[in-house]
Amino acid sequence: MSEVEHHYEVRSRQERYRGRIFDVVTEEVTMPGGGTGVRDLVRHVGAVAVVALDDAGQVVLIRQYRHPVGRHLWELPAGLMDVSGEELPSAALRELAEEADLTAGQVDVLVDLHSSPGFTNEVVRVFLARDIADVPADERHERHDEEADLQVVRIDLDEAVAMVLAGEITNASAVAGLLAAARSRDTGWSTLRRADAPLPR
């Protein structure tokens, strides 16, 4: 393409809300043709999710209540990047232990996604965890609030993909992670990236 992309310059910013997980701001942004537009956006801390695959080819799914949609959803073990200084692979292993009582001997990057770029800068990194094992019973995380209601199951990866395509799994990181895991498996894991690969910019 020969055309030069327009540089969207922020002319002003007004903070509407500041929270632990996200901030809401309104920005005035320069538009092609000389005008400006006002955009509301959510600045998010980011998140990780984990496709945990066992030796039998089964993946770990959790069923968790999500209040914004008012129902339980099938998801991957996942969580926020809300621990200061924590590296992404460590966060993934922490969430796997807290939500599924599992450890992993091998962790790779499956896929990165902007969860909803029309209004938020949230980036979710989805990892593949293999060589999984149970966390000892006396070392398991005590779950609270919605996590106390978690249901944890293992199903065949291809069955999980069928659930995605049937509309039974709609969580964005789960959809992306499961489809990426199946594709990567079918290509001999050749698409995997190192666990410390840089995030997209």
Image (cartoon, rainbow, N blue to C red):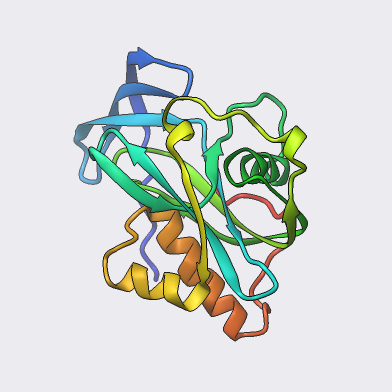
The x, y position of residue 61, in whole percent, is 49, 56
In percent of width and height, residue 164 lies at 35, 68
Q: Is residue 190 placed above or below 87 in the rendered structure?
A: below
Q: Quadrant of residue 192?
A: bottom right
Q: Position of residue 109 (x, y in %)?
A: 65, 60
> Left or right of 70: which side holds 156?
right
Count of marks overlaid on the render: 0
Identified at 65% across, 45% down, the residue is: 101
133 is higher (above) or lower (below) than 181: above
Apparent side of residue 56 relative to residue 103 in the rendered image (left or right)? left
Q: Is residue 126 left or right of residue 26?
A: right
Which residue corresponds to the image point at 30% horizontal and 38% vertical from the top-left?
119
The residue lying toward the viewer, choosing from 30 and 130, is 130
Q: Residue at x 62, y 41 (%)?
A: 95
Viewer-proximal residue, 11 or 192? Answer: 192
| Image quarter of residue 42 | top left
Say which of 147 and 162 sits in front.
147
Which residue extends farthest front? 137
The image shows residue 74 at horizontal and vertical percentages of: 39, 54
Work out which quarter of the rendered image holds the N terminus and state it.
bottom left
Q: In the rendered view, does 73 fall on the left or right side of 93?
A: left
- Which residue is at a point 64% across and 26% down the rendered structure image? 83
Residue 100 in the image: above or below residue 185:
above
Query: Farthest residue toward the bottom?
Result: 187
Q: Is residue 58 above or below residue 52?
A: below
